[in-house]
Amino acid sequence: MITKDLHMHTCYCDGSAAPEDMVISAIDKGLSTVGISGHSYTFFDESYCMQKAAVPRYLAECRYLRAKYFDRIHVLCGVEQDYYSDYPTDEFDYVIGSVHYVKVDGEYIPVDESVAILQDAVEKHFNGDIYALCELYFATVADVVNKTDCDIIGHFDLISKFNEREPLFDIRHPRYIAAWQKAVDTLLKHDVPFEINTGAISRGYRTSPYPNEDMIAYIKEHGGRFVLSSDAHSTDGIAYKFEDYEDLVNGE
């Protein structure tokens, strides 16, 4: 039984609940360890991330909650460090390394905001070639451990967030497969676990986690490790459907 969840967001960034509400909900769900992981500050997009001035309060509140609930749950204070964030991570208990943007022609393009943004980017920067965008995304993901020195690799195929509901590309296309397999091969050298992230399921974007089942199988076959993450943005998302995927984390 999985008893920890280390990927969740609160009102300090783009989540809806206070950290204490998330901790109490984690206790109610029977977890032994909970990690709050606010989005790191990104200077080029402040719409979703923790503000610089709020980070000391975030750290202090997490530490207060750790002391308050020490006899009921272990509270960790983490950060989801975007590839393009330059905010220091030294004070956090752990780091999730994630790629939310690709950078091209000096522009930061979010890959998980909308279908329209991706379509516009393909036409503007990639001459209509969606697989060129995918290749750039996975090339960036391949470097996320080097860049963030992370402890967990976040939602490996985030670029596919909308693809199940509004297909943008064929996940069976040889170029797409070659791009993600090359990224996996590079990341496996670091022996950092990939998260199996159920956040897009709980929010209705997908019916399966990140990474997809082919990627999970490939990572397992090549000796990779996993942790389960909910990427919860509200209390009801914590440990979402963990029971469906815990065998993968346990190596079965």
Image (spheres, helix red, strand yellow):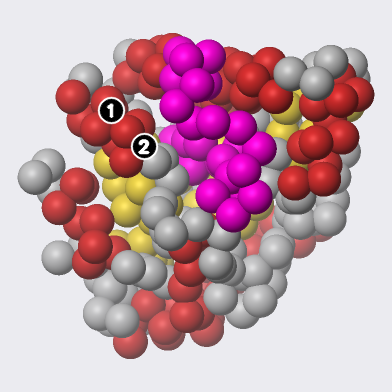
Residue with the mark numbered 2: 194
Of residues 227 and 247, the one nearer the viewer is 247
Contact (Cβ within 8 Å) of mark 2 with mark 1: yes
249 to the left or right of 236: left
Say which quadrant the N terminus sits in: bottom left
Residue 158 as seen in the image, left or right of residue 180 = right
**One can see residue 170 in this view:** yes
> Residue 219 shows which numbered tag?
1
Dot label at residue 10: none
232 to 40, vertically: above or below? below
Which residue is nearer to you in this view: 124 or 239? 124
- Magenta stretch mostly in which secondary structure? loop
- Residue that appears at 31% across and 81% down: 29
Q: Amino acid at mark 2?
A: Phe
Whole-percent x, y for residue 136 in the image: 66, 18
Q: Is residue 210 left or right of residue 43?
A: left
Task: Look at the image and say whether residue 62 sits in the magenta stretch.
Answer: no
Hey, what amino acid is under mark 1?
Answer: Ile
Residue 83 to residue 11: above or below: above
**Residue 164 lies in magenta, yes or no?**
yes
The boundaries of the magenta stretch are 153-179
Q: Please report the residue visible at 36 percent of the width from the left and 37 percent of the height from the top.
A: 194
Quadrant where the image shows the C terminus? top left
Q: Residue at x 32, y 33 (%)?
A: 214
What percent of the width, then of the height, locates residue 134? 62, 24
